[in-house]
Amino acid sequence: MKLTATVLDTPDPKALARFYSELLGWPVATDEPDWVTVRPPDGGAGLSFQTERAHTRPTWPAGATDQQMQLHLDIEVDDLDAARRRAEELGATLADFQPQDDVRVLLDPAGHPFCLWIRT
């Protein structure tokens, strides 16, 4: 067995794929109306995006009755502040709650939380 991708549901797979393609510098590998993939140039598991018309943005951190995130992506960066600014320029939003000094939690354009982190 081989893990090939993590799949994120979204109302607009093309837009979310474009966000992560630009953020990570990965090219789009598959571009269909309801399914778009981005893959790292050096191989390995990538990200896929599929249409979910009933997508509900997760709440982070979630309360007892909120839509909870099902997973999140951890992205290692060299410069935390520069990476955060770049992600925001591409359409991410800084989450209100930041639990660690060496991590920045952001929400992608579809509301999925992801973490930028720097090794300390």
Image: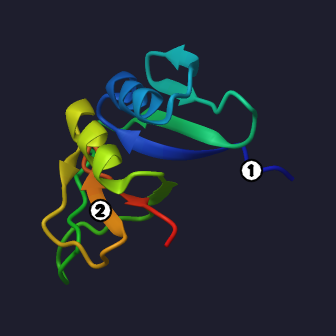
Q: Secondary structure at mark 1?
A: loop
The reply to whether residue 51 is in sight is yes
Judged from this view, the residue extending furthest toward the right is 1
Q: Nearer the viewer, residue 77 or 18?
A: 77
Which class describes the residues within 10 Å of circle 1: few (<14), some (14-19), or many (20+)? Answer: few
The disc at residue 75 is none
Give residue 26's position: percent from left, percent from top: 55, 28
Residue at 62% over, 39% down: 46
Q: Secondary structure at mark 2?
A: strand
Residue 89 found in image quarter: top left
Mark 2 or 1, nearer chain start: 1
Residue type at tag 1 = Leu
Q: Nearer the viewer, mark 2 or mark 1?
A: 2
Q: Left or right: where does residue 3 sit relative to residue 86?
A: right
Picture residue at 31% right of the left edge, 28% below the top:
12
Foreground pick, 5 / 24: 24
The residue that appears at 50% across and 25% down in the rendered structure is: 36
Classify 62 as above or below 86.
below
State the colouring used for the structure image.
rainbow
**Residue tagged 2:** 105
Q: How many marks?
A: 2
| Picture coordinates of residue 41, whole percent (x, y) | 68, 27
Residue 40 position, x and y percent, is 64, 33
Return the residue at label 1. 3
Q: Amino acid at mark 2?
A: Val
Percent position of residue 29, x then y: 61, 20
